[in-house]
Amino acid sequence: MGRRETMRVKCLRISVTDRCNLRCVYCRPPDDCDFINQNEILTFEEIHRIVRLFADCGIDRVRLTGGEPLVRRNMTSLIARLAAIKDIKELTLTTNGVWLQPMADKLKAAGLDRVNISVDSLEAENYKQITGCDVLSRVVDGIHKAIEVGLQPVKVNAVILRGINHSQIPALAGMSIDLPVTVRFIEYCPTNKNTHPANDYMPYSEIRNVIERAFGPLSNAAIGRSSGPALYFKIKDSAGAIGFIAGRSTTFCRSCNRIRLTSDGKIKPCLYSAHTYDLKRLIRSRASDRQMRDLLKRIISEKGNYTKLSSLKEEFSMCKVGG
Ligand code: SAM
């Protein structure tokens, strides 16, 4: 079977800002103040138009990310506009959770379906060491609020760094026993020479061993319509589930069904590829819907040409591309 036949691009991941209120050691170095100029960032009208046209081309899932999406002003109005696009079946958001508790009700009312919340430690000092901020209790409140208002299933994302937060693996996995959340362990991918060194990496197999030593064997679990690249399991008798995103120790190009739109309007068909398409330039040169749609269809059909294995690698910053 050809590579292209195995993938159907269904999911558009949009970075709505490159700004963030945290400084996670593996994501953005503390001295990185190299922000994209505000007038280079896509407006809500431009994002709405791109999503509407992508929906015409078969995309039916949209994830809003960043930077931190909840630091962009009036996010609820963007969510309401995107939720009203008929063919978009699922609208989700990835957040660090710092502003989630006060915003969850409004996000839900605007039409958001669910959230992924990043939390790499449940120990306050350790959390601060990783993110640079003393806000763990706000994030935990955000997780509870998301469950309460029905932004479900809530997924909790944790990047594990050896020697920094690997001792938190049992506590993080244990959240899935009592709470109806899926705790996903993400392998650290070195993306930028200024972030944490590559030898902090802990592979999926080792993380899984730690969890099984603490809680016994994991059983397979199927989650949602399409789990994409994540593998899902359950601890016995747990309310939630455990997931692994092994982006480094495995290659999941064949199950990758997403493309990314950066906050300054570039389509990145593969996270690891240096190749981008400049949609903002096209929009701002007054391209018609038909011209735009033609390009989007081409991007989707060419997606299989850009894979981790064949791509020209480049350094990038996850907070700019949108993790
Ligand atoms: N601010 C939001 C958040 O914290 O979830 C959204 C943006 S953040 C870039 C999205 C996801 O990318 C987070 O789950 C984060 O842990 C993950 N991420 C960032 N840098 C990473 C890296 N070098 N390796 C693996 N995952 C990374």
Image (spheres, rainbow, N blue to C red):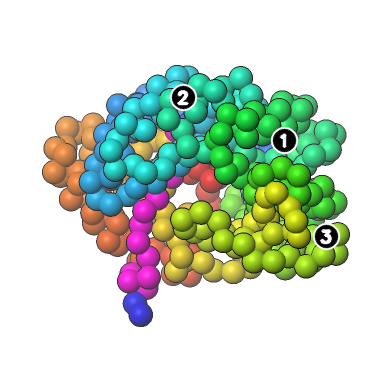
Query: Amino acid under label 3?
Result: Phe
* Front in this rendered view, residue 37 or 155: 155
User: Which secondary structure lies at badge 3?
Assistant: helix
From the image, tell me which residue sits under label 1. Answer: 131
> Residue drawn 51% across and 54% down?
224
Cα–Cα gap, marks 2 and 1: 30 Å
Q: Marks 2 and 1: CB-CB under 8 Å?
A: no
Query: Could you tell me which residue is drawn at 26 percent across and 34 percent down?
Result: 49
Residue 95 location (% of width, % of height): 58, 35
N-terminal-most mark, 2 or 1: 2
Which quadrant holds residue 249?
A: bottom right
Residue 146 drawn above or below residue 250: above
Tag 2: amino acid: Ala
C-alpha span from label 2 to label 3: 37 Å
Please give the residue where the numbered disc 2 appears in the rendered image. Answer: 109
x 69%, y 59%: residue: 234
Horizontal side of 214 relative to 69 (left or right) equals right
In the rendering, at what x and y percent does residue 114 appear?
A: 52, 38
The three-letter code of the residue at mark 1 reads Thr
* Nearer to us in this view, 8 or 193: 8
Q: Is mark 2 within 8 Å of ligand 1?
A: no
Identify the residue under disc 3.
Answer: 215
